[in-house]
Structure formats: structure tokens, C-alpha cells
Amino acid sequence: MTDPLAEIVTLLQPEARFSKIVGAAGPWRVRRTEAGRPFYCAVLEGACRLAADGQEPIALQVGDFALIPAAYGFAMSSLAPMASNVANSTPISLGDNEFRLGLPDGPPDVVLLVGYCHFASPDAALLVSLLPQLVHVRGESRLATLVKLVGEESRGLRPAREVVLARLLEVLLIEALRSTARTTASPGLLCGLADGRLAPAIRHMHADPARPWTVALLAQAAALSRSAFFERFRHVVGVSPMEYLLSWRMALAKRQLRNGEGGIAEIAERVGYSSASTFSVAFSRHVGLPPAHYARKYQGKRESTSSEEAFPAA
């Protein structure tokens, strides 16, 4: 059976690029403004508060994991609020990638593993739009075990620590996305897969993207009326059924064009278009480049990379 989440994760190509241990005591607050980088936080000890722009603040407890697939602005703070006129806390470096917030002395009230990951796919922005704006996982024993392993590896000085930590974090990210289907999340693909009525329709779209799907056909798969299916899909997934289908078809088409998996007419047929011209119009509108130009752009990148690998710099 087609696994939509596995397909999304495979296309995203998550990588753990950076992480640090942060301990904090007393009242503290930090605010970050980002350009859409994926941010994550694992609570190793204690508790704190996370407030992502556009989302209700949440209290994070030990063992919790939070992921913002595209962070633009967020704040983290102690549970005890700081006065609004007090400046944000300045992290103090303790060396070896560890930092301290709030009171500089004494045992910390909370210990966090925070960092940024990277989605290597050129389609990351499109695919991230299919994910919840905030992933918060609690009470998952497998995830708690991974958080504990990551914490131990971060604090240790064992050989190949960075390699092991990167792999553990990648598994942690994937497990968090998978676990979210069973927890509370903002609208997105994961919520759709957790919905017993919507999941069959989503799997049908992934299993056979070339089929001329309509809202009526997908509603039949969900055993709902057309109007009930449309409203439920838009509420739970965050986009209409046809918008979701278009996004998925374009992600598949872009991957096939980048990899040179056939001509434009062949790729058009695979992703549900009756002609190359119809596909070209839809692709150009969605991506901003005609399919042929998009393919040449990435073909040039592949050839450049191959030349560099064949003739490395001295």
C-alpha cells in the first residue's frame, strides 16, 4: 500500500545540520526571527514555553519534541513570565556547544536540545506547505527514547559523536512526523492521514496520481458526501483536495524532470495530464518556469557537479 508520509519524507531529504545544548534557570526569554528554516527542540530536563508566530503558546515538558518545519518567528521562555519591558536574555557560552540562559549559577531548571535541520529537496517549500505549521509530540515512548539518546550523545565525547548525533536527529525528525498522526497538530498532511475518512482519499491520490480525480470520486473513497468531504479536507489538511493533488503532482513532476526520467509528454501523462501542452501551462503557472527550462536548469547543475567530482580541485 502506498505510504504518503514515506513519500513526503523521502522527497524532503531531512538532514540535521546544527544543534546545541541550552540550560536555563530563573526567568528568561529569547526570541528568534528566521527565514523559514526548520527549527526543532527536545526537552531533556524540566519545562519551558514555546510561542511560534501564528500559533497558541505551548508548555513543553521533559520528553517533549517540537518541530517548526518553516520557522519565521518564535520565542522560548521560562514558564514564569518575564516582564514585557525586560530585554530578551543573552545566551552565555559554556564551551563545547553548550549555552546558559537566565541565572548564570546553580542547577538549571530546564535543559534543551535545540537546533536547525535542513530539507535538501529543491521542492522543500512546496512539501513543507503540506506539513503542519507546528509539530508537538508528547507521551510517545519511542520518541522519548530517541530524545534521551540524543541528549546522551550530545553530552558525551565519544568518537564520531557528530556523525551519530546527525543520524539520531534525522530519525528523531522522521519519528516526530510519524507520531504527529496520533497527536494534536495544526492542519496538514499528517492530520489528514490521522483522519479515518480522509486517509483513504489521500492514499488514492498518492497511489495513482495520473487518474483524473474529481472531488466526487475522492469523496466516494472517503465515504462522505461531496460537500462534507470538501469542507472536512480543507479544514483538516489546510488546502482543498484539488490544491493538494496539484501540489503532489507538481512535486512528482519536478523530481522526474530533475532526474531526467523521460520526456515532457511522458512525465505529463504520469502525473495526470492529457497532453504535454496542458501540463506545460500548469507547470509554468505553478513553478514559474516551463518544464523544459526547469529540466535544463537541473541538468546543468548535475553536469557541473559530475565534472567537479571527476576533476576535484587540487
Image: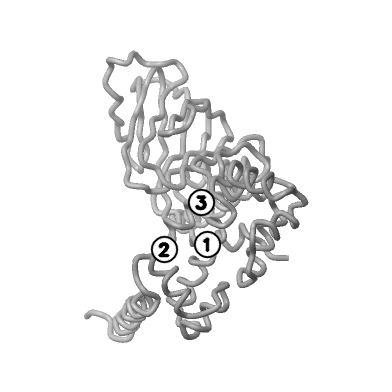
In the rendered image, residue 182, in percent from the top left (x then y), is placed at 68, 42
Left/right of residue 193 with respect to residue 119 in the rendered view: right
Judge the density around disc 3: few (<14), some (14-19), many (≥20) Cα neighbours within 10 Å: many
Q: Residue at x 51, y 57 (%)?
A: 167
When the figure is inspected, residue 82 is found, relative to residue 13, above or below; the finding is above
In the rendered image, residue 177, in percent from the top left (x then y), is placed at 58, 49
CA–CA distance in space, label 1 to label 2: 9 Å
In the rendered image, residue 108, in percent from the top left (x then y), is placed at 44, 24
Secondary structure under tag 1 reads helix
Q: Which residue is mark 3?
A: 169
Amino acid type at circle 3 is Leu
Viewport quadrant of the N terminus: bottom right
Left/right of residue 221 with respect to residue 104 in the rendered view: right
Q: Which residue is mark 1?
A: 246
In the rendered image, residue 224, in percent from the top left (x then y), is placed at 75, 48
Residues under numbered marks 1 and 2 in contact, where contact means CB atoms less than 8 Å apart: yes
When the figure is inspected, residue 292 is found, relative to residue 100, above or below; the finding is below
CA–CA distance in space, label 2 to label 3: 33 Å
Residues under numbered marks 1 and 3 in contact, where contact means CB atoms less than 8 Å apart: no
Q: Which residue is mark 2?
A: 286
Badge 1 or badge 2: first in the primary sequence = 1
Q: Residue at x 51, y 77 (%)?
A: 268
Judge the density around disc 1: few (<14), some (14-19), many (≥20) Cα neighbours within 10 Å: some
